Image (tube, helix red, strand yellow):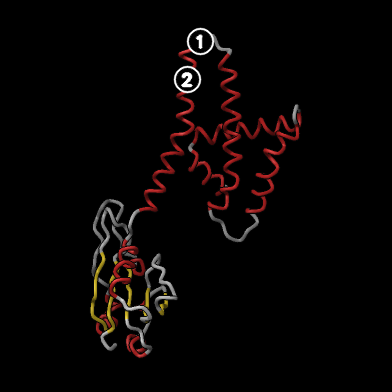
Amino acid sequence: MIYAKHLRQALGWPAALLAAGGMLLAAYRAFAGPDRVKWALLLVFPAVYFYLINGWGFMFARYALPTVPFIALWAAISGVWLADRLSVVPVPGSGRRAAMAVALLLLVVPGALGSIAFVRAHGTETTQALAWAWMKKSIWPGSSILSEARGLELPPERYRAEVVSSVAARDAGTIAASGVEWIVLSSDAWGARASSRGEAASASVPEAYAPILARARPATVIMPSADHPGPVIHILRVADR
């Protein structure tokens, strides 16, 4: 059901309903003929593959991508079937063409808009991307970094980095004694983000981080905005290093 929901959201209701109709038509033709093998080929791989991914321990929407070409063919089959039925309706040719054009737009536009929105969202420069750009310019390669920022992957060939769920749970003295030179704090770790209503995220760090802040000095603070979504990120330089 979860995979079906993801596919329906990606395609939109019109295309999803047509695809369901095309799948049923393909199943009927696979049993009733003619060309049973041709129609069966449209069903065998999606059925086997869908059964396979439902047995995996992890579930990600991208696992369903190999079924999408078949779903598109099912929708096209239903579209052609409806067009054939429309061709016998006694309406002017211009009206028939207009109806087919509207149907085609209903099929294509929802998925196209969703695709554009997906690409735009993943092409947005987040606060994690801004933090990484700052670190590449300001932190010497080989430095030791303790980070709680999710979505900020630090390459091991450049930095000696440790990622934890919360830096606040670590003892400040132990951090300094272990040789950590930089600390990256993220508001994701304490649940503070800009709201969907446009309210700004707070740059303040919770009291639980006070011992850390006492042993480190702020280097930069990266705030989210409409153009740069993400958590508030504080990058600190450990004072003892």
- Name which residue type carries label 1: Val
The image shows residue 21 at horizontal and vertical percentages of: 61, 31
The image shows residue 108 at horizontal and vertical percentages of: 47, 34
* Residue in front for this viewpoint, 212 or 133: 133
- Name which residue type carries label 2: Ala
Q: Residues within 10 Å of mark 2 (few under 14, many from 20)?
A: some
- Residue 206 lies in what quarter of the image? bottom left
Decide if residue 167 is on the left or right side of residue 21: left
Q: Return the residue found at the far bottom.
A: 177
Q: Residue at x 24, y 67 (%)?
A: 203
Q: Are marks 2 and 1 in contact (CB under 8 Å)?
A: yes
The image shows residue 207 at horizontal and vertical percentages of: 27, 76
Q: Residue at x 65, y 33 (%)?
A: 24
Q: Which residue is mark 1?
A: 91
Figure check: 63 above or below 13: below
Q: Which residue is mark 2?
A: 99
Decide if residue 216 is on the left or right side of residue 169: left
Q: Residue at x 24, y 64 (%)?
A: 202
Q: Earlier in the sequence, mark 2 or mark 1?
A: 1
Q: Secondary structure at mark 1?
A: loop
* Residue in front for this viewpoint, 50 or 119: 119
Q: Which mark is residue 105?
A: none
